[in-house]
Amino acid sequence: MKNQELATIFYEMADLLEILQVPWKPNAFRKAARTIETLSKPIEDVYANGGVKALKELPGVGDAIANKTEEFLKTGKIKELHELEQRIPKGVDEMMHIPGLGPKKAVMLNKELHIKNLRDLQRAAETGKIRKLAGFGEKSEQEILKGLSLHAQGQERKSLLMGLDIARELQSRLKTLAGVERVEVAGSVRRRKETIADIDLFVTSKNAAKVMDFFTTMSDVTRILAKGPTKSAVLIGNLQADVRVLEPKSFGAALQYFTGSKEHNVRVRQIAIDKGFKLNEYGLFTRAGKYVAGKTEQDIYKKLNLQYPEPELRENTGEIEAKKLPTLIPYDAIKGDCHMHTRWSDGGNTTEEMVRAAIEKGYEYLAITDHSKSSIIANGLDEKRLLKHCEEIDTLQKKFPQIVILKGSEVDIRKDGSLDYKPAILKQLDIVMASAHQRFTPDRAAATQRYLKVIQSGNVTAISHPTGRLINAREPIDFDFEKVAQACADANVFLEINSSPSRLDLKDSLIRTAKELNAPFIINTDSHTTEHLRFIELGIAQARRGWLEAKDVVNTLPRKKFLSAIK
DNA sequence: GCCGTTTTCGGCCCGACTGTTTTCAGTCG
């Protein structure tokens, strides 16, 4: 799967074009990169099945980018990228990835201080050299240092989406090998942690050597880190993947051990010791070394007199002590996706395409929620266009009677806590997702008040991506979450769990907090193309990590009950 | 470079915020 590699090239080209101040093109390249990055099937398959013509059908991909994609698939590179790199001083592109630094400042830092990499940048900031430049000050120096550490975190941990895609791809490859009986994914991918560091795979096979050979010679391996008789590690792109071949009698023990988390395992192993056992990756043993269990995880937990914790719960945050663990919301429980965009604002597909995709997913209902007028950059809809879009939805509803199409909006919350459309307009909609897009002032009390005003307005269904955080890129809005969650519980306003891989907003601990306050939830994808509808799995995973059951989430309800619940 | 409920050519990427400024430049969504 070369999607990520190609998307990275297009992002890179976008950055370089931006440094050169070429208008429009950077956005076009980014849009195409996003499409390719979130595609569920390998880009090489799209090309193999339909050539350049099929590539051009992808949202944001036209003649030029389709041809460049073809060039990449045929030659492994894109000439224009190298030409661009020649024209830009070293380090400028890298610096642009630091939050707070754009093309102008990056060029200036390179020119004035001869900064050629992030280490130079760190040193210059620490020694107070940057503040002396025109346009910089003490504060921007601090921001650069903060940005550097945020960036470093992002380098280490990848998105869960990427981890899952690659883990599943490797899993299915290994399954095709003769002699392989079972393949499982462990580690933080199995726990569905919002970011992952590497991929752990476990295999039972009669021919371990063959598995090792296969794994280390796959076409997308960029480096072999280790290769032994039963364990190998490789880099795929810059993501590490490990595989181990195990005896069936140790399979469950290894799965348990390497699923973690570390904190969970420490507790479980301590309990084993207290009960006169020893637990390691080969099994549960008596003190004398006699094998007691290990074939399945269930056997081990049972022998230790513990409830079986689903992997998403294994963080040592109460799952060991809980009298009764929750019955987590199943991965197929969602009956409708209620936050998505179309070409009317910044989405990549038409309304009809989104509807068809939702039907294909087996949903009973969906909501179209394009941006409101303040989101100018996202081509937000003014009242006139909104109402026109509603007419289109009416027409589509007649065409597709098998699914309920809700008229909605992702309405911007303004600085003063008012909404971007007047109540009279909002009343005409079936569902209103309120979103804070501007960062506002960093004033906790004001931010809390703003949310309370929105929740108590009686005009909104839900609060979308409530904290506004972007994983490894942007800090959450600072507000009194408990107060806001309590207000949601009181007013029956839903807290959205946004499934977008870069958001996963709310995070697990906040979900648990809100659940304890009886706040109601809705899980949505915030899709910008039909492909994004698959993100729902990530939102459900997040909900499970927050200990939610199906009954806690409104869009697990069948259509009739759902419609009356959001009234 | 992409796209078509305003257009197959000419729009699109504007406005708020921040920090550094004494009236504005750069960044970000």
Image: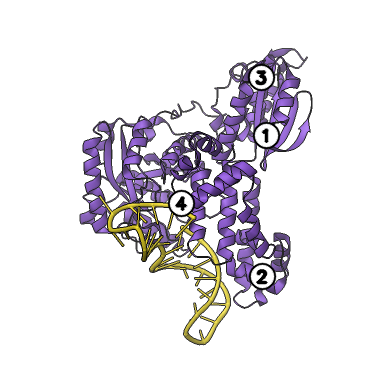
Chain colours: A purple, B yellow
Query: Which element is circle 4 on?
Result: loop
Q: Nearer the viewer, mark 2 or mark 4?
A: 2
Disc 3 marks a residue whose amino acid type is Phe
Q: Position of residue A209 (x, y in %)?
A: 76, 21
Residue A467, label in figure: 4
Residue at image point 52% right, 38% down: A47
Where is mark 2, residue-wise? A109
Q: Position of residue A304 (x, y in %)?
A: 62, 19
Q: Position of residue A73 (x, y in %)?
A: 59, 42
Q: Residues within 10 Å of mark 1 (few under 14, many from 20)?
A: few
Disc 2 marks a residue whose amino acid type is Leu
Where is mark 3, residue-wise? A251
A26 to the left or right of A285: left
Tags 3 and 1 touching, CB below 8 Å: no
**Please, which chain is the residue tagged with disc 4 on?**
A
A372 to the left or right of A29: left
C-alpha distance separating marks 1 and 4: 41 Å
C-alpha distance separating marks 3 and 2: 54 Å
Where is mark 1, residue-wise? A219
Q: Nearer the viewer, mark 4 or mark 3?
A: 3
Q: Vertical placement of A543 versus A279: above or below? A: below
Q: Nearer the viewer, residue A232 or A509?
A: A232
**Does residue A456 show up?**
yes
- Which quarter of the rendered picture does the C terminus of chain A lie within? top left
Query: Which element is circle 3 on?
Result: helix
Q: Earlier in the sequence, mark 2 or mark 1?
A: 2
Disc 4 marks a residue whose amino acid type is Thr
Q: Nearer the viewer, residue A36 or A241?
A: A36
A93 to the left or right of A333: right
